Image: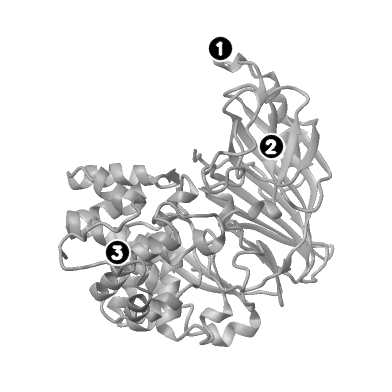
Amino acid sequence: MASSAWRGSDVGGGSHRRRLIGALAVLIALAVPTSAQAFERPSPGAPGLGDRLFPLLGNGGYDVQHYDLDLRYATSAPSQGIDGTVTLLAVATQSLSRLNLDFSGDSVGKVTVNGLPAAFTRDSGELVITPRLPLLKGLPFVVQVQHYTAHPIASDPNDLLGAPFFITPDGSATAGQPAGTHAFLPSNDHPRDKASYTIRFDVPAGEAAYGNGVLVHKSTSGGRTHYVYLQRQPMATELIQLAVGRYQEIGRGVHGGIPIRDAVSPSLAGLLADKLPTEIDHLEWMKARVGEYPFDIYGSLVVDAELGFALETQTLSLYDRLWFDGTFGGQGIWEPTMVHELAHMWFGDSVAPYSWDDLWLNEGHATWYQFTFAAERDELEENTGIADFTDLMQVIYQLGDIWRIEDGPVGRPLSPEAAQLFSIQVYYGGALVLYALRQQIGDAAFQRLERAWVTRFRDDVASTQDFIALASRVSGQNLTKFLNDWVYGTKTPPMPGHPDWTVIPTGDAAARTFAAPQLLSLRRRS
């Protein structure tokens, strides 16, 4: 459902942009459908996309093409909320009498559809919109939610991903994965519906503001600074980054055609001075393995907070200080973690999951490259507790049945709770699936598959079945049963090339603890 970027001609905002939106709304209202299908009887769009883990996440009946965000932060207080207006350009996939957006923020001022006032109600996390005129199948339409409000909250490292819009000592930032973006943005909050973005910030002069993509406009007047960011390539809502505060920007130049810039808490600048520059080498390392970087810019946002996770917000990976200050360990922790988040730019961001059951495709791949990088740099033992890559895979294999009972198969997490959705099974077990696949098809075919995957589905969404089909085509083997067993089976299949590998019985707690005490303690989110 990905689509190309939509741009207004005035990226700096203002009345000209509003006139363009108004003119577009008139054209849409006057448009005549070219197909009889467009005259189907209008009906309400579904209040969810039917995701197994998040049934009410996302909404049916339309495909968002572009989000235009206009966000005002009235003061520089870190707890300052958003007064926002979001304009969505979408296409109706059915004739709609009513449609929903996901939104659980504080309040909504006004809603218009194609420039006309629309009725709306709030129902839990749903914003239910009834346009004055029905929306016809196949035609574009514009929804604008004006003066909605949302406020950041304090993060709690014991509540994983429990603060999608969070306060830092320097300001605020966002971490919407998996289902939190609609706490601060009315949206179709499911990765299946990707769109391009224009993100506009209006902040007190002297405050910095960072969004996804490239900064295309900045100006200061009347004590206010205005920023405009353009994220050209489609992005899932869960990957948005809105960071405002006293952050310090560090430009690192252009490398291989990709500008790199970081934003950090000023209190961390000294700590990070010899760490963040490694992302330049990481970028070249990843490009050598999977090909062209898929976006216009890259960098890191490091906040002086305790989040308990790192996150692949698109083009600007998010970290807390714990990754770098020795809390989690030394270079063998933070550097492979940076590679993990960078790998997500291909696996999870550019190629987004069709459903949350497909999360292993993101995390298994990012973990694979994390392990590979750590092994090449002699950092694997610090990273995982096991020094040899094959030995690591064997230990993960031994624990396979235990994890399948505790957390579910790799592609069937038992629940949407963060501890299970982002369990070690999805990460390490996902990497083990890739190891088994490489054992089955050989390293050359595996490398071709990795490049083919991020090329074939660039800027798109894809499922496990898409991966299986492509792997079968690239390798010349029918891998349907093989990979379905590895991804969905309740028992760990035999490992190709290692007939001597065995799985620890699920009731053997003592053997389990002996096998990998370090692995069992790794429940951090990255």
Q: Decide: marks 2, 1 in contact (CB < 8 A)?
A: no
**Amino acid type indicated by mark 1:** Ala
- Give the spatial CA distance, label 3 vs label 2: 43 Å
Against 48, residue 514 (above or below) is: below
**Amino acid type indicated by mark 3:** Ala
What residue is shown with label 3? Answer: 288
Q: Is residue 107 visible?
A: yes
Q: Residue at x 23, y 42 (%)?
A: 473
What residue is shown with label 1? Answer: 36
Instruction: Mark 2 vs mark 1: give the one in front.
Output: 2
Task: Please tell me in which quadrant of the rendered image residue 406 appears.
Answer: bottom left
Q: Is residue 386 left or right of residue 229?
A: left
Q: Residue at x 40, y 52 (%)?
A: 411
Neighbours of disc 1 within 10 Å: few (<14), some (14-19), many (20+): few
User: Of residues 55 and 187, which is closer to you in this image?
Assistant: 55
- Percent from the top left, x then y, of residue 343? 41, 63
